[in-house]
Image (tube, rainbow, N blue to C red):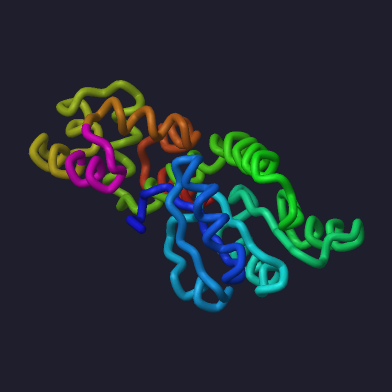
């Protein structure tokens, strides 16, 4: 999977794994599918899955704890099970950190509806988290340039405020646009606003910028 491509993470036995992959494809999600949690863990990178479908019998509960430690509470996760479907099992799964718990015998359309609702509900928080992750990759000077830009300063005004040349401001801008994955100053400003970092970085000094991003990362 590409580092920014939305995907589903599936850990399930051979008897159902292909079925989950096919269902998730109906939501437009390619899947990274594994038989064992240990193999799935080895594949993880900085990009959280759009949803994780984890079979309890294949180490799903323990792996979910690892996913929560790595990606936080905003990543949607569903525990599924063929045998452990008592109310006590469901409660235990939810306490581990699952957003939903489903029996493998659940109707496919109901399962899809639950997953779709879960993804839609958590998408804003996940988008903000992704934006913050991109912002955290900026250098201090790049953050300063972005902070001044969010205040509406022109490139010349940014150069004056920072005591650097316009050419240097332009170089910082090109670098930050590339790191943020956007193509214009306006897109960068919009991303900063979505992440709630515009005001936190607005003073333009090194400490304010560094702490503004660091406290949210």
All told, the count of numbered labels is 0
Magenta region, residue range: 173-183
Quick one: quadrant of the N terminus?
bottom left
Q: Is residue 53 magenta?
A: no
Point out residue 3 in the picture as x, y percentages from the top left corner. Answer: 35, 56
Q: Quadrant of residue 174?
A: top left
Outermost left residue: 167
Would you place residue 27 above or below residue 207 in this image? above
Point out residue 85 in the picture as x, y percentages from the top left corner. Answer: 84, 60
Q: Left or right? Give the position of 114 relative to 156.
A: right
> What residue is drawn where x is 27% and y is 45%?
142
Point out residue 7 in the picture as x, y percentages from the top left corner. Answer: 45, 51
Q: Is residue 177 magenta?
A: yes
Viewer-side residue, 133 vs 106? 106
Q: Main secondary structure of the magenta part?
A: helix
> What residue is drawn where x is 20% and y is 46%?
175
> What residue is drawn where x is 68% and y is 40%?
114
Viewer-side residue, 119 vs 204? 119
Would you place residue 131 above or below residue 86 in this image? above
Q: Quadrant of residue 82?
A: bottom right
> What residue is drawn where x is 74% and y is 63%?
81
Q: Left or right? Give the position of 196 relative to 1.
A: right
Outermost bottom residue: 38
Q: Quadrant of residue 52?
A: bottom right
Point out residue 22 in the picture as x, y percentages from the top left corner. Answer: 50, 51
Viewer-side residue, 2 vs 114? 114
């Amino acid at each position: 999977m590409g580092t920014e491509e939305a995907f589903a993470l599936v850990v399930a036995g051979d008897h159902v794994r292909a079925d989950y992959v096919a269902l998730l494809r109906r939501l437009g999600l390619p899947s990274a599918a594994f038989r064992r949690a240990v193999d799935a863990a080895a594949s993880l990178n900085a990009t959280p899955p759009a949803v994780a479908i984890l079979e309890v019998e294949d180490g799903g509960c323990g792996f979910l704890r690892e996913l929560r430690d790595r990606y936080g509470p905003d990543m949607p996760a569903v525990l599924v099970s063929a045998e452990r479907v008592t109310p006590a099992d469901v409660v235990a799964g939810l306490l581990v950190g699952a957003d939903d718990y489903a029996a493998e015998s659940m109707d496919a359309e109901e399962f899809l509806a639950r997953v779709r609702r879960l993804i839609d509900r958590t998408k804003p928080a996940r988008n903000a988290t992704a934006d913050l992750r991109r912002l955290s990759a900026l250098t201090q000077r790049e953050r300063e340039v972005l902070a001044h830009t969010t205040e509406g300063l022109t490139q010349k005004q940014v150069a004056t405020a920072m005591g650097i040349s316009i050419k240097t401001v332009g170089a910082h801008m090109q670098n930050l646009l590339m790191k943020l994955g956007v193509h214009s100053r306006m897109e960068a400003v919009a991303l900063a606003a979505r992440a709630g970092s515009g005001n936190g970085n607005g003073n333009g000094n090194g400490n304010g910028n560094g702490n503004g991003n660091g406290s949210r990362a």
